[in-house]
C-alpha cells in the first residue's frame, strides 16, 4: 500500500517485536540460526558461572560475570529483535493489504440460478458470485461473464478506474476493489486462506519461510567461521595452561562471542525478510524469497513495448494526402473511416484531425461500420450515399485498389516506406477503392526510459523489447529507446523460444505478462511477474504478482534483488572485519596478567583487562541494533559496474569494518573505565 | 648496494627467468600440444602398456581422486614395510638399523604426502637402499601427485562445461617424465660437480687438526637433493639438511637449490593462465602470491640482518647480523630468503636453523606455512589458493549484488560447504594438535615414552610453545621443516604428526578438485557488465584480504602466546 508508513520503528511494531524477541529465545527456534544459537549457549553458561562465582573463587567477581551475562543476553535479544521487527513490518504491510478484504457480503449464484447473500469468508473455490455497480468485490476471482469498470485504488493506489472483462487477458478481479459500473459474474479461484497474499504473509511471518539457496550458502560459511572460533577458544585453554595464565570462563566466552560473526548472524534473516517486504512495498507480491534473490541475478529482461517502453498506444501524427487529393478531402476520409473505430489508434486520428481545425461530425444516419478482421486487415464506414471509406494496412488496401483496376500512386507508396523506416506505422485510406493518402502513426517513447535502460546495461542486464510490430518499426523504436534487442511480430511462442534460447546460454531471464498465452513463458522464465489484472493462469505461472500492473516494475524488482544480496555481503564483510579490533582488545587482556610484555599489543591503550573485555562485548552487542536500519532498508545499489562497486563496498564495509570497532571500543572503554 | 641483498634479488630474478617459460611449456605438455620433449613418448607409452592403462580414458573428478588415493595407499603400505626391514636389505654399508613401527609410520606418511618431516637423521636412520627406493622414489611420485591434481583442476575450467577432466595417470606420468626427471638431472649434475657426494661407499673418516677422529657420512646424495627441491619435498640426505656442507657446498649450490624449489610452484600458476586461456587471471594470482611473499620476506631479512636485540643490549656489536644457527658461507640475508621460501612453499628444507632465527622471523615462518599458498607446494599451492579464492568470490559476489560466480560457473551452497570445510581444517589441525601437545606437556609430563613429554622442549616458555606450534603447523602444511629444539622421535609426535600430515594433505587436494569438478560441470554463464571479474586488481586485493584476515583470525592467539610473547618479552 502506498499509504503505509515508511518509518522504520513504529511504536506499535516495536512493541510486538520486543515481545517476539523474548519468545524467540526458545532454543528450538534459535537453533535455525547456528551463530546466534552458540551465543545463547554462552549466555546460559555465563548465567551458571555468575551463580557459581558467588560461592567460589577463581572465576572473577559475580557482579562482573553478571554484567557479561547481561550483555550476552542483550546480544541475543538484539538479534531476535532485528528479525522480529522485520517480520512485524512485513506483516503490517501485508495486513494493510488484507484489510481491504474484510468481511463483505457476496451474492452467490446457486445451482438453480437463484442468488443468496453469503459472507466472503465462506466462499469456496469454484463458487460463482455476482457484483453490480457499487459492490465491493468479496474475494479474488475470474470474470466468467460481463464487463465492468472497476476502482482498484484500494490495492494499487491508482485512482483511474480500469476495465475488466471476461474472456480476455484482463479477466481477474481482486478482493477489496469496487465495481463502478455494469455487472459481472465472477468465479472464485482460490480456497480461503490460500490466496497469493495469504501465502506471502505466511512467508513473512516465518511459518513457511525457507532459507533461500544463497542464504543457505552464507549460513554454511558463517557456521564454519563460528566453528573456527570454537576451535580457537577451546584450544586457548590448554595454551594458557602451558603459559601458566589462568583464563576465566567469562573471558573465554566473551572472546568467543566477539569473534563469531554475530553481526551478520543476527541480521541475516532480517535482511531476507526486509527484501520481501521491500518488494511488497513496491506492490509486488512474491511467492518465495528465492524469487527476490533470483531477480538480482537476472541477465535478460523481456519487456512488452506497449506500456513499458512506449506510452500506451500509437498515435496519429501526420496526414499525407495522395497526389491530386485535397488535404481537406483526405482528412475528411480519415475521419469518416475512424468515426466508429473504438481502438486508441482510431481515436487518435480524430484527435489529430481536431488539432488541424477540423470539425468532427457524427456519422451520417444509416451508415454501417465495417469491423476490422484479420482477413481484410482494414476497417471503415459505408454510408447510405454509397461512399465506401476504408482504412488499413498498406498491402491490404493496395490489393483492394489494384483489384478494382485503379492505380496505386507511387508517391504514396514511397511515403509508406518512409514512414516505416522512421519507425512509424502507415495506415492507408481509400474511398471507393481510390487511394486518398497515408496516415502516419507513431509510438511515443516514455520519457526517461532510455536512462533506465542505460542503468540496466551497467548492471549487466540485457533488455529485450517484445512487440507485435514489423521488424522495421521494432528496430526503429528499439534504437530510439535504447533497448539491446527486440522480438518483432511476436507471437506468444516467440517469447517462450527466446527465453529458452537465453537460458540455454546460461542466462537468467525475467519477463512480465498478463495473458493466458503468456503463462507458459511466465513459468519458463526465471522470474515471471504476472500482472494482477491478468488471468488466473498467468498469475499461477509466474512467481511474482504486481498489484500495480506496471510493466516497468521489473526494473525495480531487479534492484531489490541486488540490494538484498549486497546487504548480506557487505554486512558479512563488516562483521568479519570487526574481529581484528576485537582481537587487539581481548587477547592482550587475557594474557597481560602473566605476560606483561604483551601490553604492547594493547594498541588501543584500554583501561584494564576487565574493561577491555567488557567494552569489546558491549560493542559487539550494540552494533546489531545500530545496523538494524541498514539491514531493513538495504545497502544502496549503485550501477557503476561490478569492480567499482566491489571497491566501493570493500572500502566502506571492509576498511570501515576494521576501523570502526577500534574507535567504538575505545569510546566504550573510556565510559566503562569510569565504573570498573 | 649490499651484496647480500643483491644475492636475493639475483636469485629471485633468475627464478622468474626459468619459471615463466617453464609454465608455458607445462601448459603445452598437459594440453597435449607439440613440445620438444615429445621424443619421450615411447617411454610413456611403454609405461602405460606395462601397467595396462589407457591414458586416453577420460575421468571425472571422483575417478581422479579414487585413482590418486588408491596409488597413494599402495605407496604407504610399501614404504612402511621397507623402512621397518631396511636393516635386512642390501645397500646398507653403515649397518643402520630398521625403523620402529611408529617412526616408520610417521616417515612413510611424511614422504608420501610431500612433507618430509624427518624424525630420523639421514646418516643413521636410513640405508642407501631406502634413501633410493623409498625417500627418493616418494619424492618424485608425491610431487607428481600434486601436479597431476592441479592439472585436473585446470581441466575443469578449460572448457565451458565439462565433466571430462583428462586421465590421472597421463598427467601423473607426464609430470615425472616431462618435468621432474629432466630437471632433476640438470640440478643433480650441478650439485655433483660442486662437491655433493654421489658414491655408494660407506662413511669416510678423517682426523681433525685437534686430533679427533671424525666419521663423515656420504652416499649417492646429489640426485635426491635435486628432487628434494624441485619437488618441494625438503627431506634432506643428511640430518641437518641443506645446512650440511656436503648437501649444499657453496653459494652457487645454495642459489641453485633455492631456484629449484620455487620454479615449479610459480610455473604452475603461469601454466594455469595459459591452459585455461585467462592469462590475466594467472598474473593477478601470481601478483597476490608475490606480494604475500615479499611481505614475509622483507621483515624476515631485516630482522636477521639487524641481529639479536638481546645481544645488542649487552653492547655486543653484530655487524654480520644474527649468525646463530646460520652458515658462514651463506650469511643472514640469503638464509632469511631461504627460510621464507621454504615455508611459503611447502619445501621445508633448511640452510639455517629456524629454531635460532629471531622471534619475529619465527612468526613469519609460521604464517607462511599457515597460509601455505604464497606459491605453495608443487601443484597443491594453487589448489590451496583456490580455496581462499572461492571464499573471496563468494563474499565479493554478494557485495556486488549477484549470486557469486567463478569463471562463468555459479558458486552455490555445495561448493561453499567444501571450501568452508577446507578453510576450517587447517586451524582445526594446527590448533587442536598444538593444544593436545600442550596438554600432554603440562599434565602428563612423566609419560613413559622414548622422550618424556617434560623433556620434549630444549627451550621451555614461549619458545618451547613455538616449537610445538611449529611442528604441527609444518605437518599440516606438509612442509617438513622444524624448530629443531623439539624431541620429536617418540610415539606421541610420530603418531600425532602422522595423522595431521595425512589429513592435511589429502583433504586440501580433494576439496579444491571437487569444487572445480562441480563447477566445471555447471552450466556456463557468459560474462556481463554485472559479473564480478576475478582477473582485476580489486579482486586480487580482496583475495589477499581474505587470506590475511582468515589466517590472522585463526592464529592470532596462538602466535601471541608463542613468538609474539617471546619477541615483546625480549624487548623489555
Image: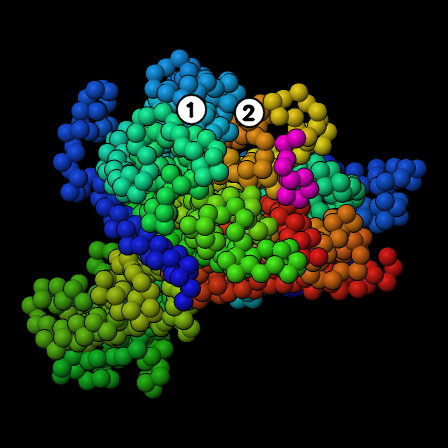
Rendered view: B466 above or below B7: above
Q: Is residue B457 magenta?
A: yes
Of A511 and B534, the residue lying toward us: B534
State the mark number for residue B495: 2
Identified at 9% across, 75% down, the residue is A410
**Which color scheme does this rendered protein use?**
rainbow
Residue that lies at the very extreme toward the bottom in this rendered image: A357
Image coordinates for residue B228, horizontal then vertical, percent = 37, 37
Residue at which label 1 appears:
B126
User: What's the magenta region?
Assistant: B455-465
The answer to whether residue B546 of the structure is visible from this angle is no
Cα separation, mark 2 vs mark 1, equals 19 Å
Q: Is residue B440 above or below residue B379?
A: above
- The numbered mark 1 sits on a residue in which chain? B
Quick check: is B461 in the magenta stretch? yes
Q: Which mark is residue B509?
A: none
Residue B122 picture location, percent across and down:
43, 29
What element does badge 1 sit on? Answer: loop
Q: Quadrant of residue A124?
A: top right
Give A564 or B55, whichever is nearer the viewer.
B55
Identify which residue, A148 or A92, lies in the foreground: A92
Amino acid at each position: 500500500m502506498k499509504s503505509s508508513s515508511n518509518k522504520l520503528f513504529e511504536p506499535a511494531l516495536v512493541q510486538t517485536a520486543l515481545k517476539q524477541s523474548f519468545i524467540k529465545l526458545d532454543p528450538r527456534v534459535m537453533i535455525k540460526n547456528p551463530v546466534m544459537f552458540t551465543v545463547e549457549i554462552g549466555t546460559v553458561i555465563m548465567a551458571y558461572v555468575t551463580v557459581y562465582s558467588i560461592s567460589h573463587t577463581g572465576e572473577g567477581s559475580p557482579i562482573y560475570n553478571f554484567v557479561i551475562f547481561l550483555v550476552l543476553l542483550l546480544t541475543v535479544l538484539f538479534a531476535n529483535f532485528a528479525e522480529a521487527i522485520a517480520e512485524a513490518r512485513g506483516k503490517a504491510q501485508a495486513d494493510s493489504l488484507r484489510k481491504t478484504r474484510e468481511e463483505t457480503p457476496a451474492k452467490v449464484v446457486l445451482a438453480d440460478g437463484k442468488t443468496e447473500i453469503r459472507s466472503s469468508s465462506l466462499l469456496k473455490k469454484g463458487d460463482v458470485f455476482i457484483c453490480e455497480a457499487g459492490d465491493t468485490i468479496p474475494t479474488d476471482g475470474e470474470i466468467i461473464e460481463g464487463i465492468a469498470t472497476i476502482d482498484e485504488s484500494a490495492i494499487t493506489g491508482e485512482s483511474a478506474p480500469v476495465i475488466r472483462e471476461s474472456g480476455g487477458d484482463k479477466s481477474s478481479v481482486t478482493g477489496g476493489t469496487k465495481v463502478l459500473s455494469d455487472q459481472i459474474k465472477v468465479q472464485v479461484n482460490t480456497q480461503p486462506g490460500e490466496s497469493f497474499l495469504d501465502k506471502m504473509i505466511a512467508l513473512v511471518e516465518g511459518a513457511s519461510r525457507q532459507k533461500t539457496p544463497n542464504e543457505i550458502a552464507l549460513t554454511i560459511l558463517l557456521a564454519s567461521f563460528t566453528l573456527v572460533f570454537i576451535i580457537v577458544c577451546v584450544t586457548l585453554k590448554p595454551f594458557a595452561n602451558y603459559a601458566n595464565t589462568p583464563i576465566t570462563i567469562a573471558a573465554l566466552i566473551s572472546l568467543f562471542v566477539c569473534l563469531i560473526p554475530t553481526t551478520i548472524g543476527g541480521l541475516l534473516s532480517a535482511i531476507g525478510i526486509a527484501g520481501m517486504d521491500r518488494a511488497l512495498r513496491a506492490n509486488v507480491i512474491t511467492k518465495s524469497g528465492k524469487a527476490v534473490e533470483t531477480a538480482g541475478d537476472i541477465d535478460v529482461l523481456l519487456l512488452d513495448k506497449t506500456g513499458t517502453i512506449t506510452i500506451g498506444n500509437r498515435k496519429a501524427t501526420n496526414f499525407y494526402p495522395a497526389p491530386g487529393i485535397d488535404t481537406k478531402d483526405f482528412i475528411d476520409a480519415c475521419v469518416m473511416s475512424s468515426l466508429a473505430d473504438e481502438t486508441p489508434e482510431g481515436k487518435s486520428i480524430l484527435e489529430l484531425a481536431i488539432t488541424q481545425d477540423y470539425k468532427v461530425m457524427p456519422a451520417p444516419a444509416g451508415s454501417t461500420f465495417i469491423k476490422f478482421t484479420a482477413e481484410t486487415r482494414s476497417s471503415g464506414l459505408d454510408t447510405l450515399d454509397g461512399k465506401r471509406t476504408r482504412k488499413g494496412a498498406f498491402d491490404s488496401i493496395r490489393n483492394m485498389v489494384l483489384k478494382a483496376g485503379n492505380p496505386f500512386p507511387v508517391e504514396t507508396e514511397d511515403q509508406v516506406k518512409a514512414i516505416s523506416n522512421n519507425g512509424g506505422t502507415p495506415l492507408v485510406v481509400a474511398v471507393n477503392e481510390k487511394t486518398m493518402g497515408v496516415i502516419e502513426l507513431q509510438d511515443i517513447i516514455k520519457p526517461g526510459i532510455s536512462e533506465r535502460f542505460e542503468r540496466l546495461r551497467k548492471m549487466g542486464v540485457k533488455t529485450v523489447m517484445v512487440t507485435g510490430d514489423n521488424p522495421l518499426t521494432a528496430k526503429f523504436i528499439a534504437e530510439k529507446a535504447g533497448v539491446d534487442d527486440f522480438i518483432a511480430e511476436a507471437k506468444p511462442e516467440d517469447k517462450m523460444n527466446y527465453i529458452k534460447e537465453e537460458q540455454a546460454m546460461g542466462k537468467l531471464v525475467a519477463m512480465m505478462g498478463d495473458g493466458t498465452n503468456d503463462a507458459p513463458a511466465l513459468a519458463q522464465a526465471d522470474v515471471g511477474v504476472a500482472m494482477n489484472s491478468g488471468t488466473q493462469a498467468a498469475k499461477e505461472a509466474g512467481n511474482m504478482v504486481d498489484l500495480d500492473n506496471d510493466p516497468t516494475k521489473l526494473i525495480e524488482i531487479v534492484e531489490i534483488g541486488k540490494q538484498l544480496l549486497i546487504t548480506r555481503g557487505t554486512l558479512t564483510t563488516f562483521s568479519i572485519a570487526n574481529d581484528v579490533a576485537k582481537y587487539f582488545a581481548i587477547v592482550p587482556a587475557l594474557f597481560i596478567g602473566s605476560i606483561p610484555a604483551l601490553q604492547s599489543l594493547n594498541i588501543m591503550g584500554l583501561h584494564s583487562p576487565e574493561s577491555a573485555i567488557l567494552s569489546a562485548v558491549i560493542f559487539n552487542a550494540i552494533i546489531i541494533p545500530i545496523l538494524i536500519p541498514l539491514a531493513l532498508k538495504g545497502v544502496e545499489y549503485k550501477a557503476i559496474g561490478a569492480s567499482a562497486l566491489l571497491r566501493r563496498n570493500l572500502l566502506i564495509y571492509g576498511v570501515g569494518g576494521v576501523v570502526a570497532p577500534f574507535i567504538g571500543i575505545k569510546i566504550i572503554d573510556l565510559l566503562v573505565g569510569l565504573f570498573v | 648496494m649490499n651484496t647480500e641483498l643483491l644475492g636475493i634479488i639475483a636469485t629471485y630474478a633468475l627464478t622468474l627467468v626459468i619459471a615463466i617459460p617453464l609454465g608455458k611449456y607445462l601448459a603445452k605438455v598437459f594440453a597435449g600440444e607439440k613440445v620438444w620433449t615429445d621424443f619421450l613418448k615411447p617411454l610413456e607409452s611403454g609405461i602405460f602398456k606395462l601397467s595396462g592403462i589407457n591414458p586416453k580414458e577420460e575421468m571425472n573428478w571422483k575417478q581422479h581422486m579414487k585413482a590418486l588415493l588408491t596409488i597413494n595407499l599402495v605407496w604407504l603400505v610399501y614404504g612402511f614395510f621397507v623402512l621397518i626391514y631396511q636393516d635386512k636389505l642390501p645397500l646398507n654399508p653403515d649397518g643402520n638399523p630398521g625403523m620402529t613401527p611408529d617412526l616408520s609410520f610417521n616417515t612413510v606418511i611424511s614422504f608420501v604426502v610431500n612433507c618430509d618431516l624427518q624424525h630420523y637423521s639421514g646418516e643413521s636412520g636410513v640405508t642407501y637402499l631406502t634413501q633410493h627406493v623409498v625417500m627418493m622414489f616418494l619424492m618424485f611420485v608425491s610431487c607428481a601427485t600434486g601436479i597431476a591434481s592441479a592439472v585436473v583442476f585446470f581441466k575443469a575450467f578449460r572448457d565451458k562445461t565439462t565433466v571430462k577432466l583428462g586421465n590421472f595417470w597421463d598427467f601423473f606420468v607426464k609430470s615425472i617424465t616431462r618435468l621432474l626427471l629432466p630437471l632433476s638431472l640438470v640440478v643433480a649434475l650441478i650439485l655433483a660437480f660442486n662437491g655433493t657426494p654421489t658414491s655408494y661407499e660407506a662413511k669416510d673418516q678423517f682426523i681433525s687438526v685437534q686430533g679427533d677422529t671424525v666419521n663423515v657420512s656420504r652416499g649417492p646424495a646429489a640426485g635426491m637433493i635435486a628432487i628434494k627441491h624441485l619437488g618441494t619435498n625438503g627431506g634432506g640426505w643428511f640430518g641437518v639438511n641443506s645446512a650440511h656442507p656436503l648437501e649444499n657446498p657453496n653459494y652457487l649450490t645454495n642459489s641453485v637449490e633455492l631456484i629449484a624449489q620455487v620454479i615449479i610452484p610459480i610455473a604452475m600458476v603461469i601454466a594455469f593462465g595459459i591452459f585455461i586461456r585467462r592469462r590475466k587471471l594467472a598474473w593477478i594470482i601470481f601478483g597476490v602470491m608475490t606480494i604475500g611473499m615479499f611481505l614475509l620476506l622483507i621483515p624476515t631479512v631485516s630482522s636477521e640482518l639487524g641481529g639479536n636485540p638481546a645481544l645488542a643490549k649487552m653492547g655486543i656489536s653484530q655487524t654480520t647480523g644474527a649468525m646463530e644457527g646460520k652458515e658462514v658461507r651463506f650469511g643472514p640475508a640469503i638464509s632469511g630468503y631461504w627460510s621464507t621460501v621454504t615455508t611459503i612453499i611447502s619445501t621445508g628444507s633448511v640452510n639455517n636453523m629456524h629454531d635460532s632465527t629471531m622471534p619475529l622471523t619465527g612468526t613469519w615462518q609460521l604464517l607462511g606455512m599457515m597460509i601455505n599458498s604464497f606459491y605453495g607446494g608443487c601443484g597443491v599451492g594453487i589448489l590451496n589458493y583456490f580455496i581462499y579464492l572461492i571464499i573471496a568470490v563468494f563474499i565479493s559476489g554478494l557485495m556486488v549484488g549477484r549470486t557469486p560466480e567463478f569463471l562463468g560457473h555459479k558458486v552455490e551452497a555445495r561448493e561453499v560447504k567444501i571450501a568452508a570445510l577446507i578453510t576450517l581444517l587447517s586451524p582445526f589441525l594446527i590448533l587442536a594438535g598444538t593444544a593436545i601437545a600442550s596438554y600432554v606437556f603440562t599434565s602428563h609430563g612423566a609419560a613413559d615414552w622414548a622422550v618424556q613429554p617434560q623433556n620434549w622442549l630444549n627451550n621451555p616458555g614461549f619458545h618451547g610453545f613455538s616449537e610445538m606450534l611449529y611442528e604441527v603447523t609444518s605437518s599440516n602444511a606438509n612442509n617438513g621443516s622444524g624448530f629443531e629444539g623439539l624431541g620429536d622421535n617418540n610415539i606421541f609426535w610420530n603418531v600425532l604428526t602422522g595423522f595431521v600430515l595425512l589429513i592435511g594433505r589429502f583433504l586440501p587436494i580433494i576439496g579444491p578438485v571437487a569444487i572445480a569438478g562441480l563447477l566445471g560441470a555447471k552450466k556456463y554463464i557468459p560474462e556481463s557488465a554485472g559479473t564480478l571479474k576475478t582477473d582485476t586488481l580489486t579482486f586480487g586485493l580482496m583475495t589477499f584480504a581474505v587470506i590475511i584476515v582468515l589466517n590472522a583470525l585463526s592464529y592470532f592467539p596462538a602466535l601471541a602466546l608463542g613468538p609474539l610473547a617471546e619477541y615483546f618479552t625480549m624487548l623489555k
